Amino acid sequence: MHSRKLARCAVTGGTIVTVFFGLAGPTAAVASQQDPSELVDRIVAVVADTVILQSELAEYIVQLRAQGAQLPEDPDSLQKFMEEALERKVDEVLVVVHAERDGITVSDTELDEAVDRRLNAIRGQFRSQQEFEEALRARGVTPPEFRIWLSQQERGAMLVQRYVGTKMSEAQPVAVSEEEIREVFEAQKATLPPKPATVTLKQVVITPRPTDDARLIAEERAEEALSRVRSGEDFARLAREYSEDPASRERGGELGWVRRGQLLPEFEEALFDMRTGDVSDIVETQVGFHVIKLERIRGNERSAKHILVRPEVTDADIERADRVATDVTAALRAGADIDSLIGAHGDPSQQSELIDYPQDQLPPGYRDTLPFAQVGDILGPVRIESPAVPGGGFWIVGKLLASSPGGEWTFEDTRENIRIQIQQQKMLERLVQRLREQTYIEIRDLELIPLPG
């Protein structure tokens, strides 16, 4: 059976709102033209030991409609649309089945956090919690049922993303011709949003640095935590007691699945040199002292926990960083070499060069000066508030190297992104086809499925 392109396994926040509130709920929207007494759920496909019900297919079609798919009006085309939708649904279930077989999991904590984020985004589109719940009740859905539905969608999406990411990173790239790239560009260019105004600049990022005494105190506290871990105490409980990482502390230090390139260099080097179950020695990074525990290995990913102890940053440290930022700005305006200043004063954990960076994503202090800036001008110093940085923020001083006013996208602008897009799609299709060849799949008759009105 020919493999169709893999559709997204879960819709995003705005689409979920459309599915439930704009289209009267998943199954109801598809079955609206049939007497309820005639509706009997049944199996429409089998993938390995997993079945797909007609109600699930109906829900999936509503998702496709919410994403912009148009239902054909004539019966033959509509039947073909339904068959292709089922093929795509089979592909999604197929990937989830193999993700689970490969031991890929989504922790309860990760899933709850993802569902909470989605629920908060959806609730934010209503004037009150009461209005949100009334909209659910109007569609015959209770808040607990809606959360269960969201959990199913989020779990499936996370499994697919992790499995596909792992397999794609291990796969050999496929060739993409210039003709294929040009064809996609011509098909997409009419729908592309305007090209944003961009800048290219180098910057010195200056963060407050604690004193040696403060570092020593923090290191001793991290050593105390490490000693208790190695004596057999529960790592998660110790993380809640010692760790000063607000993003992971209440989760017992859990970082979830991470890859190379997502972590501070010293942390990454230690983590990817560990074996499952190992606890690291003290690892010092720009933000403090870490105790790391490697929980699981999955391809190029690691699941880990950590305890972070930060050295105290005082008001005097913050004032000193402020003076350094002022001095760096003066030196640049006097003609000093920015690369030398980056090496002497820049925070190595922060990005020192922005290439073709969208202007509207720059910090306000940068962005506000750009309309008056010329190539070669010095920008800053600008204070950026950030709770993730010791002292609560940092300073940036930049030198503008190039700027673009934006406008229409050209073929050369998009060529590389389109090439990667096509390559990934081909690799994905090849992966799905291989999984189909390894898996029992049965597609059943669709004639009795209620069709949308």
Image: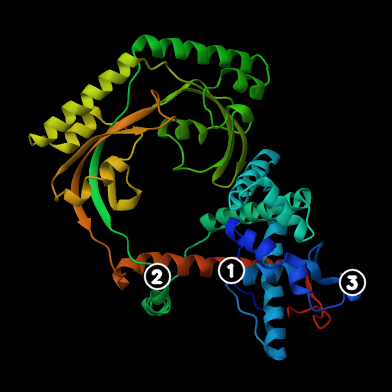
Q: Is residue 46 visible?
A: no
Could you say whether the residue bearing mark 2 is in a helix, strand or loop? loop
* Horizontal arrangement in the rendering, residue 195 relative to residue 167 (left or right): left
Q: Can residue 378 be seen in this view?
A: yes
* Residue 40 tag number: 3
Mark 2 residue type: Leu
User: Which image quadrant is residue 76 in?
Assistant: bottom right
Q: 201 and 169: which one is in front?
A: 201
User: Which image quadrant is residue 411 in?
Assistant: bottom left
Residue 193: horizontal and vertical position, in percent? 39, 67
Q: How far apart are marks 2 and 3 (CA)?
A: 43 Å
Q: Distance between the residues labelled 3 and 1?
A: 27 Å
Q: Which of marks 2 and 3 is nearer the N terminus?
A: 3
Q: 142 and 58: which one is in front?
A: 142
Q: Earlier in the sequence, mark 3 or mark 1?
A: 3
* Residue 417 tag number: none
